[in-house]
Amino acid sequence: MACRFSELVVDSRDPEALAAFWAAVLDYRVLGREDGEVEIGPDVGFGGAAPTLVFAPVADPTPGKVRLHIDLNATDRDQEKELGRLLGLGATRADVGQTGDEGWHVLADPEGNQFCLLEQRLDPL
C-alpha cells in the first residue's frame, strides 16, 4: 500500500485572505475553520482526488527560499488568458532567473509564495 497526498499546509500571516485567494485560483471552497486555520478544497472535500490546502496562522513565516511550490495548469482557457486572471486576483510576477524562453510563468501569491503557471491545459477533475 502506498501513501496518498491528502493536503498541503501553508504557513501564512493572514490565513483568511490567503485561503480566499487560492480558493478563487483553484475554484475551491472553504471546507472548515479550526484554531485560526482555514482549509479549502474541491466540493468533494478531504480525501477526494485533489488535495486540500490548509492555511495555518504563523506570526513570522520562515525566511529564505521556499523549498517547494505549486504548479498550476489552466483547464478552460489558454495560458495567457489564465495568466491575466491570476494577475487580476492578486498574483504578481516573480523573477527567479528565468530566461523568457520557458513554457511557464513564475508568479507569487499575495504573501509572496511562488507558484508556476504551466503551458499545457488539463481537463478539470
Image (cartoon, rainbow, N blue to C red):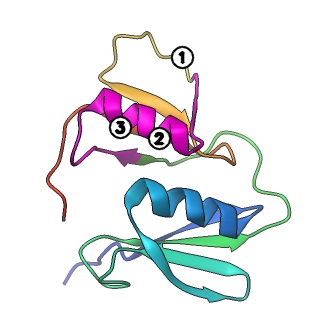
What's the distance in space between the residues labelled 1 and 2, CA to CA?
21 Å
Q: Residues within 10 Å of mark 3 (few under 14, many from 20)?
A: some
| Relative side of 20 to 56, left or right | left
Amino acid type for the residue under numbered disc 3: Glu
Name the mark nearer the viewer: 3 or 1.
Answer: 3
Could you say whether the residue bearing mark 1 is in a helix, strand or loop? Answer: loop
Q: Which residues are magenta?
A: 71-95
Image quadrant occupied by the N terminus: bottom left
Residue 63 image point, x, y percent: 77, 46
* Residue for point 24% across, 33% down: 78
Residue to which mark 3 is pinned: 82
Tag 2: amino acid: Leu
Q: Give coordinates of residue 124: x percent, y percent.
A: 19, 59
Q: Which residue is mark 1?
A: 97
Distance from Cα at disc 3 to Cα at disc 1: 22 Å
The label shown at residue 118 is: none
Q: Is residue 113 above or below residue 99?
A: below
